[in-house]
Image: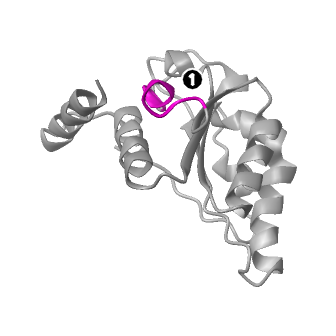
Amino acid sequence: GITEHIEELIAKAKAGEITISEAANLAIHEEMLRDPTTTMQAEDLQAGSSYGIPGMTQQTYGSMRASDEIISEGHFIGKGIGEAMNGYRPIIELMNTNFGIYGMAEIASAGNTYLQSGGQFKLPITILGAGGTAPDQALGAEHSQPLHAYIMGIPGLKIGAAAS
């Protein structure tokens, strides 16, 4: 169950053996357990997505809080922004972050809405996923572009990158 899954991830973290994907999965579960307004959206969610980042979310929290999305990143980024404007804290996992370019208008709108409203619209939205290259992955150019390079000039966004 979820308790055992979380305990296993915490043990791996304490031993210094947790992967970035596992650490993201642990953080997602911690937030979803802590705050019932936190939601999860990803493609292939029932299977845990390609990299396991949202693993066990739909099975644990149900399809209303953890929705399995169609392959249309602009759609579910926009859906997440709507949720954030209405009091929810969506986490959106892009299977490969460079597909976020299909949601660029929505991502720019999120940053601009926060600034143009003088902070009245707080948009607590997190977008994450795999990006860049790895020695053991043959993702090709169409799956290896990190999204942060595209969005770092958009005002109102906070951008972070994981590292080991």
17 and 114: which one is in front? 114
Give residue 16's position: percent from left, percent from top. 17, 40
Q: Is residue 29 left or right of residue 73?
A: left
Give residue 44's position: percent from left, percent from top. 61, 19
Figure quadrant of residue 114 = bottom right
> Please, is residue 152 above or below residue 161 in the view?
below
Q: Residue at x 51, y 27 (%)?
A: 58
Q: Residue at x 60, y 65 (%)?
A: 158
Q: Is residue 159 left or right of residue 9?
A: right
Location of the N terminus (image quadrant) = top left
Q: Residue at x 77, y 61 (%)?
A: 110
Sort mark 1 into few (<14), some (14-19) or many (20+) by Cα contacts within 10 Å.
many
> Please, is residue 86 above or below residue 145 in the view?
below
Q: Secondary structure at mark 1?
A: helix
Location of the C terminus (image quadrant) = top left
The disc labelled 1 sits on which kind of residue? Answer: Leu
Q: Residue furthest bottom?
A: 118
Magenta residues span: 54-63
Give residue 84's position: percent from left, percent from top. 68, 58
138 and 82: which one is in front? 82
Q: Which residue is mark 1?
A: 45
Q: Is residue 68 left or right of residue 19?
A: right
Give residue 156's position: percent from left, percent from top. 71, 71
Figure quadrant of residue 107 = bottom right
142 and 31: which one is in front? 31
